[in-house]
Amino acid sequence: MPEQQKSVTGTPLFERYTLSHAYDEMFTAEGDIRLAYSELAHLLRSISPAELQQRQRYADLTFLNQGITFTVYGNDAGVERVFPYDLLPRIIAANEWQHIERGLHQRIVALNHFLHDVYHNEHILRDGVIPRHLVYSCRHYRREMRGLAVPRGVYTAIVGTDLVRLPDGQFVVLEDNLRVPSGVSYMLTNRAVMKRALPRLFGAYGVRPIDHYGQALLATLRTLAPAHRPEPTIVLLTPGVFNSAYFEHTFLARQMGIELVEGRDLLVHNNIVYMRTTKGLQRVDVIYRRIDDDFLDPMVFRPDSILGVPGLFNAYRAGAVVLANAIGTGVADDKAIYAYVPDIIRYYLSEEPILPNVTTYLCDRPDECAYVLEHLGDLVVKAVGESGGYDMLIGPHSTREEQAQFAERIRAQPRNYIAQPTLQLSQAPCFIDGVIEPRHVDLRPFVLFDGERTTIVPGGLTRVALRRGSLVVNSSQGGGSKDTWVLY
């Protein structure tokens, strides 16, 4: 079906706006405005491109003045840049959000059951639901965690799950981020900027608030604290100022009113973790860590790490300190294990998945690997342990040479790769070069779990593939974001 040119009556802003096979967040396939976007359409009929451009500049300047940046690796023009922000909100109706919430709750509960099981009784492996070798060969599986009890059975308390909307309007899970999920600070700052840039539009909608995320995160971390520490000291452990998400680390520490620390600020004595302060040593009870497992403790993991704390794992194993998220959670967001999440939900909860997975081919299976190698030009191939859009092939946008290189990698390490169909991510209106054009988007809601209660702030980080036709939304690959409104 050829693309159809549609425009919003009475404004030249949409002169380059095209509808395609992808689900459009604002328009129906017939070009009618969806009910949730009616007020936004009304604004765009009454505002001039110059005024919209002025408000976009205001938003960009706000991000610049606040130092809201992200690192774009491999960019010769400079690795650090102001976080790209699109002025127009992505709007989600209340009934759609209720469905997403139920699906995310189901998923985080099942994944915590799975993590406890694989590090303890291994029932799911003994019953053959998941191949044992797939778990043991995962680069994020930590044998050191076997038999180690974690508070309230919570392995992953903070989750960012990536959702995409298919052409039929259905939300599906693209991947789970269970180790050190990032992006929540951009969700919160997007909202703060939006309220100032388009205050009348925001006031015209009944938008559910997200400002309470920082306190909800703090409450979750307090719940996980050792039982004998009723007034726990909580810190956020960062790799330091050169980390790509350092802005987020400082932002969240301020939001929660806790100390931001680096590994050199902590020490372990008699299996107790202490923080160095101007008043002397202060005991630490909960560490919200933004450092990968490998770098947490040079005595147990990578001996060359200068980011972590020597002796931290022994203190953790003794139950004297809590880490959120727990060590070893990465086994559950391995992209090969992802393919089994529907089975994990059925196994532990005896329920059908509310949010389905994307069809996934495991190159570890010879028949599926053969299919992938024959159809590299049609599929998206991903390394199972990577994130941020790295080590990935988007078949339809790749060259013969790139496909040949990936074929060699797959044949050399089939366990390390999965493949999925090239999805038509939904598109949303974005203000680009003075006009409004569609760009592909995904959604990363943030989920908090304390073992009993699931907290999901209504919204999430909508990431935008800013280049026309691109499907890569990752910030580290040059993508941007927009505010996400969930309506009452």
Image: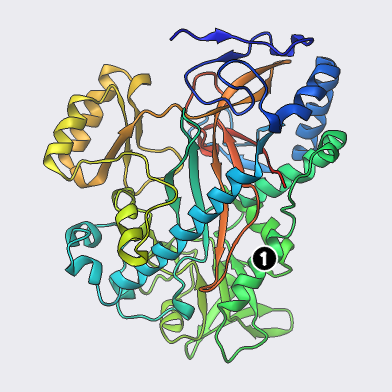
What residue sits 45% from the left and 80% below the top?
316
What residue sits 71% from the left and 66% below the top?
215
Residue of label 1:
216
Image x and y of residue 430, in percent: 66, 24
- Image position of 80 (left or right of 176): right
Name the foreground residue: 350 vs 73. Answer: 350
Image x and y of residue 162, in percent: 49, 45
Location of residue 129 by image quarter:
bottom left
Image x and y of residue 420, in percent: 32, 35
- Identify residue type, mark 1: Ala
Task: Indicate the colouring scheme.
Answer: rainbow
What residue sits 75% from the left and 9% below the top?
12
- Image position of 148 (left or right of 72): left
177 to 147, vertically: above or below: above
175 to 115, vertically: above or below: above
- Image position of 310 (left or right of 14): left
| Quarter of the image where the N terminus is located | top left
**Disc 1 element:** helix
Q: Which residue is outermost to the left?
A: 366
